[in-house]
Image: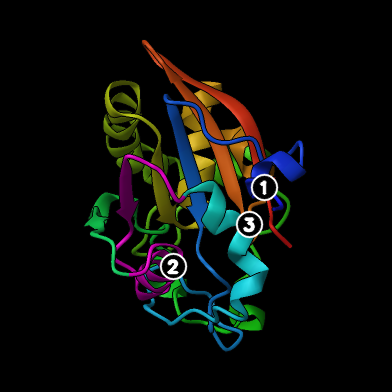
Amino acid sequence: MTKHVPIWLKSPEMTPPDASELLLIRHAPALHDGRLCGRMDVPAELGEAAVWAPLQALVSEVAHRVVSPALRCRQTAQALWPGAELEQDARLWEQDFGAHDGLRFDEIPDIGALTSGELAEHRPPGGESFADMVARVRPALKELAEKARQDGPVAVVAHAGTVRGGIALALGVVPPALGFEVAPWSVTRLRAYPGGLSVISTNWRPI
């Protein structure tokens, strides 16, 4: 009889999460119709289950499953954990782009060349800057990191901005986090330790 081999043992990139890990998952591709969607609530395109099955295997045994209230995040989480209880946290929403939210990409005003620091502080009319968003998600991620230390690995399904917020928290500085790519269906793995977070890996994708 052939012995079943867990999927993470077939790939050095798929080691199972440690007890103190915080796994930040970006939702499946958003059906945004070419529009900027921060707070605009749009569905996700889940695609074939075989595409994200390795990610599902990686996060199947986490202690807590937390999700942004956005429809695209809830759909992604329901695909990863069918029938499981999910905890929603509104602090994990994507950056609020204010008056720019819902604009077609070619309608968004050109803000010119900015340094990473200037970009992190740029606030769209009626919205929030990336630095504002990091300040919003920081308490939630700190709480979840503490849960990971106490109870075991915690998985969060949220947005690219939320994931970059977690990276900023681990780095201890905000602007450089904007330089990290965060693809749909990707997972960024952080390790929680007393007093902070460290980065294990970023933007791992099962496809």
Please report the bounds of the magenta region as a residue range.
60-82
Q: Which residue is mark 2?
A: 38
Q: Secondary structure at mark 2?
A: loop
Q: Which residue is mark 1?
A: 3
Q: Secondary structure at mark 1?
A: loop
Q: Which residue is mark 3?
A: 54
Residue 154 higher or lower than 160, as above or below: above
Q: Please, which residue is most extreme toward the bottom here?
A: 33
Question: Is 140 in front, or is 3?
Answer: 3
Is 67 in the magenta?
yes
Residue type (three-letter) at the residue carrying disc 2:
Gly
Q: Is residue 203 left or right of residue 195?
A: right
* Number of other residues with Cα within 10 Å of mark 1, as a class: few under 14, some 14 to 19, many 20 or more: few
- Residue drawn at the location 69% of the way across and 50% of the way down: 181
Q: Is residue 102 left or right of residue 54?
A: left
- Residue drawn at the location 52% of the way across and 34% of the way down: 17
Question: Is 186 in front, or is 152?
Answer: 152
